[in-house]
Structure formats: C-alpha cells, structure tokens
Image (spheres, rainbow, N blue to C red):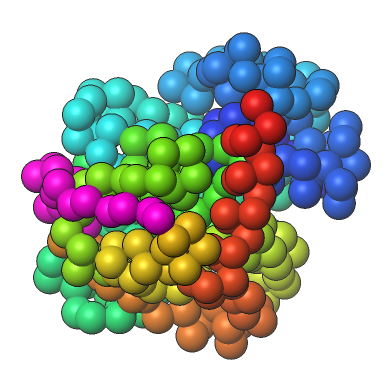
Amino acid sequence: MKFLVTGACGQIGSELVPVLRQRYGRYNVVVSDIDTTRLMTVFDEPSVKADVTIRKEIENVIEAYDIDVIIHLAAILSARGEENPSLAWRVNVEGLYNILEIAREYDLDMVFIPSSIAVYGPETPDNPGDIAIMRPKTLYGISKVLTELLGEYYYMKYGLDVRGLRLPGVISWKAKPGGGTTDYAVEAFYHAILRREYVFWVRPDTRLPMIYMPDVLKAFIQLIEADDNKLTVRFYNVQGMSFSAKELEEAIRKYIPDFKAYYKPDPLRQKIADSWPKTIDDTRARRDWGWRPEWDLEKMTVDMIENLSKMLLKQ
Ligand code: SER
C-alpha cells in the first residue's frame, strides 16, 4: 500500500507520518504540504510540495508515486475558518472535492479523512452518537458535514472506500495545533511550563470532548486496517476524555503547584465551544473495530508536562 498524506506538517500529520512510515515503510508514505520549509525540516523524502486546492498538483503526485491511499489531513480549523471563510472554503470544500474526484478517477483503494465534533451544533442532543442531528454553525463544521456526506456518496455511488474518525479536540506536545477552538487545552500546558500562568479563552465551566495523540494514532491505524465488512458507518466518533477548562487547570496545578489560571472568554471561540457537545458517544467504534482509549485527563497531564518540559526547557 502506498500512501499520500496531505497537510502532513500539521498537528496530526507530524506524528502520524512517522508511525505510518514505521509500519508500512518510509518510501510507501509520501508526505505533502504547502509549507515547504516545514516539509523539508520535519520529514525525510519522499516529500512533495502540493496544494490541495490545485487539482493538477495532487494528480502529479498520485501519478509520480503510484499512490493507493490518500490520508487527507489538509484543513482550516474552526476559529481560523471563521476569520478567513474564503480560505476555509477553498481548502476544506474545493480541496476535498479535488481529493475525492482524483481518488475516483485513479481508482484508489481508500481515502481517509478526519471529521470533527464541529459537525454537531446547538440542536444536537447530549452525548450524540455517529448518526445524530448535525446543524453546525461554523464553516469548518459545515465542510466536515459535507466531507461525511460526500464520503458516503462516493462510497455508495462509486465504490470508493472513504472512511474517517470524527475527532474531538486533539491534545499533543510534538507539534502545536493551529486555528482550532480546542487549542486552549494544548496552549495551557505550554504557558504553564514556560510562564506558570495562562489566560483561557473560554469560561471555566466550558466542557468539551478531547483525545490524546497516542490514542489518535492508534485509532487511525485501527480504522485504516479495519475490514470494510465490519464497518456500519463511514465516520466514527472517538473520544478519550471530557473535561472542563477548570478541571484542566486543576489537573495541571497538581504537578505545577504555582500555576495561575485566568479566564477571558473570546466571544468567537466561546460561541463555537458552546455550540459543540460536551461528550460524544463512541460505542459504535468500540463495537465495530475494537476502539478503546487508553488516556484520561490525569494520565495525559502527567505525560504532557513531562514531555513538553523536556522539549521546551532544553531549548
Ligand atoms: N480541534 C478542532 C477545532 O477546535 C475541532 O475539530 O477546530
């Protein structure tokens, strides 16, 4: 199997690519991004600068490397998408369409695309499962509903194997997230370690579903390798934990006792956070392909502080 990973230099790609290369062989995982500088510093060859909004650039990579599977990570997240809707449209909608059309034309084996809790909205009932009311209020969320619906459509109409995880906020230390509403759950650790204080951009009672990167990586591999016969939907909820900003503050303070937290809700990101569910139900992923998270708030906090301190304080 030969993979192309788009948006490889982002938070997820930076950690997923090494895992894929370890498992399937370095030359079977081609990485692409529009950020050439990061592409060259973060990854070994094979790596290609490619813009998902330009179909020809992606087609060239598919042909040159004889790709079988696209892992399509390139996306503009929720908060950045509200600040720059036309960019979000181009990358998240036109880019998505390019990827699906190319996969269909070249008869690829699979397209794997992350979805997000951003597909949900205020009308969604508590703890939604995979099939629930989805009336998102952000362009990012709308583009992820489109991702899911088009993915299902290509699967039914053309037999293209499109699948993906509906991810909550992703917490990790190796590469920073960018432009997301849930990024405070990562930033808080950076600030706690470097400055002993952090100003949360949400209220203390803001509770959202989250997941730690090792669980994300495990879920990617499990779902990529899952037998298609076992799948009963194309996009699966996965959740590692759910905590409020206040609970995160307290968890960090257990290990950094002089950590001070302040709260200054940002109207844009608070509104987005308030429109998302506090927890999501991932029973179907557990049942269909054996998903089981290993990281909770306490365990993640210890690991984040340990690894991030090593990384930041040695610089
Ligand atoms: N972490 C993402 C965001 O906040 C949610 O998918 O936009």
Numbered circles on residues, count: 0
Decide: is 201 above or below 153: above
In this orientation, which residue lies closer to the viewer: 166 or 255?
255
Decide: is 75 above or below 167: above
Residue at x-position 88% and y-position 32%:
27
In this orientation, which residue lies closer to the viewer: 282 or 146?
282
Decide: is 28 above or below 285: above
Q: Which residues are magenta?
A: 258-273
Which quarter of the rendered picture does the C terminus lie within?
Answer: top right
Q: Is residue 128 left or right of residue 263?
A: right
Q: Residue furthest front?
A: 258
Residue 217 in picture, x, y percent from top left? 66, 57
Look at the image and say whether residue 268 sits in the magenta stretch: yes
In this orientation, which residue lies closer to the viewer: 141 or 105?
141
Q: Is residue 164 left or right of residue 124?
A: right
Residue at x-position 40% and y-position 55%:
258
Residue at x-position 30% and y-position 80%:
127
Q: Residue furthest top?
A: 37
Does residue 309 appear in the picture of this structure? yes
Residue 173 in picture, x, y percent from top left? 58, 46
In this orientation, which residue lies closer to the viewer: 193 or 31?
193
Residue 314 in picture, x, y percent from top left? 68, 32
Q: Residue furthest left?
A: 267
Does residue 59 appear in the picture of this structure? no
Residue at x-position 33% and y-position 75%:
279
Q: Is residue 62 left or right of residue 246?
A: right
Residue 218 in picture, x, y percent from top left? 68, 64
Q: Image quadrant of residue 168?
A: bottom left
